[in-house]
Amino acid sequence: MGKKRLVVIGDELDGIRAAARAVRENPEIEAKVLIPGEHLSFNCYILAYFIQNSDEDVFSFMESVMETFKAQYGIDILTHLRVTDILPLEKKVVFEDLKEGHSSAVEYDKLIIATGVVPVVPAVEGINLGNVLFLKSLDDVMAVQEGIEAGRIKKAVVVGANMAGVYTAESLWKRGVKVTLVERGSQILPELDMEMAELVRRQMGHKGVEVLVGEKVLSLIGNAKGDVVEVHTPEHILPADLVIWLEDMKPSVEVAKKAGIIIGNSGAIEVDQYMETNVPGIYAVGSCAQRIHQITGKPVCLYRQAVDDVALQVVSENIAGGNGCVLEKGVLGTISIQAFDLGIARTGLSLQQAREEGYEVETAIVSVYDDRYACGGSYRENVIKLMVDRSNGKILGVQCVGGVLSDKLVDTVAAVISMGGTARDLAMLDVARHFSYFMNLHPIPLVAHVMLNKLEGKLKGISPFELNDLMQKEEVVLLDVRTESEFKMGTLPGAINIPLEELEARKDELDRQRNIVLISERGRRAYLAFVRLRQMGFERLSVLDGGLLIYPFA
């Protein structure tokens, strides 16, 4: 009996990884990978990494990756082949040889589509100028590296302030390039809630990176050589030696669609629980494949930082031995980057997404020093925001901005979400605590206990945005309970100061008929003030969530 022929089309790393696993599971499989260029494709996160780490030879690294797959798994990687058609009835893939200029075909028993995503090229004047890149290839990395080293790239504009945009901006900034980040939306990092994203924006400002929000690029202006020199927005003219455009991506699905493969509502290829398309024997994996969100149950298309290990396992096992492996859970959209000395991570739904899905959401925000868990020589505030369903305490999402442990904290919560966990489950986790800091709660139980206090009516919080809206509608008492010296160093406009220790003696200075919002640096002393004032008979009380540390309007 002959070898089973597995063909992978597309250069996204997920495809060849799935083929390698399938070959490992079943040595009777013979795998070929058809890619349109010279190399496999890296996503823009990895490409940005190589921009900032210029001492690493990206081409040598890629060559070693490809050689590993060839040597260890016998995978035949065929380059410069552009797939034009999939013929399911004949079980053939038709391709054009971009070097020789002729067309040919290869037969398959099983087929994996791993075509990834492509940038959405906007209808903007000057988008085809030189030095306008979409950061989609190793050639783009080399162009940036050579331009920086030759002194031609000193000012850059990154368009699109999502996670990829922020990470790319940091990569250029680390190389000494003056960077402006332009975002058409009302905030950077749409993956996060606004007050969390604001922490990152402030940090970027401290590092000398200009951040413009609510600014749509109108045109790109070139010089006589055809290279970009200016970026025009409604309010700014930005000089630029380089523009990296990362605003929108879409799944590359045209060949699949042409073959009669169903494209889902998310715009990606629809697959079942076996990662198989509607055409038997054809699977899809990576960024071009539609997944189901674990919380909402709705189809989503995710541009992932790394390979989708769960999907790879399902695809490879089903190709190796028949459809016996199923996806048991959906995806949560977990993502994490380190940028501008901050850990930035999230999973699940944001507050806005949860509300759009009809959830009645409760939130809790806390801040801790991350060195108490990483045992480092320095510390950074790590701000954690937790979202739960108020009706049953089920966890909907979490976001972390701050220290080196942000991704680990999010991973912990993601695991609890995957088990259908609640805020109480999170509070009861038996997590590792360092004995040197035994007086301080681990950040995960801490944010969970704050959440439980809210759900049980022991604490009423008010978000920065709710407070800002409330202040526009009525006169509010802003009570700062920090020490007098801390108060003098800065507080909210119109706030009064009664230190926590003086509340009992000075309670008559407060109007019980007005809303009183309690303020402290991180909210902990404000919570203690909340408890004490309630014992004194005050009812119209709330605590500013997250404290002054994350208040974005000050």
Image: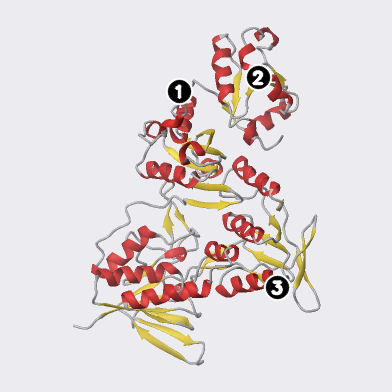
Residue linked to disc 1 = 456
Task: Determine which residue is flagged by label 2.
Answer: 515
> Toward which corner of the image does residue 27 lie, by quadrant?
bottom left
In x, y percent, where is residue 191? 56, 49
Coordinates of residue 64 in the picture (x, y in percent): 43, 74
Q: How much space separates mark 1 and mark 2, taking CA atoms?
A: 21 Å
Mark 2 or 3: the one toward you: 3
Amino acid of disc 1 = Glu
Callout in the foreground (3, 1): 3
Q: Quadrant of the C terminus?
A: top right
Residue indicated by mark 3: 150
Q: Three-letter amino acid code at disc 2?
A: Asn
The residue carrying pointer 1 sits among few (fewer than 14), some (14 to 19) or many (20 or more) residues within 10 Å by Cα, namely few
- Residue 278 drawn above or below residue 425: below
Q: Amino acid at mark 3?
A: Ala
Helix, strand or loop status at disc 3: loop
Sequence order check, earlier mark of 3 and 1? 3
Asked whether the viewer can see residue 391, the reply is no
Residue 441's x, y, as percent? 45, 30
527 or 154: nearer the viewer: 154
Task: Give the left or right position of residue 381, taking residue 128 as reference.
Answer: left
Q: Residues within 10 Å of mark 2 (few under 14, many from 20)?
A: some
Closer to the N terminus: mark 2 or mark 3?
Answer: 3
Q: Nearer the viewer, residue 372 or 47?
A: 372
Q: Residues within 10 Å of mark 3 (few under 14, many from 20)?
A: few
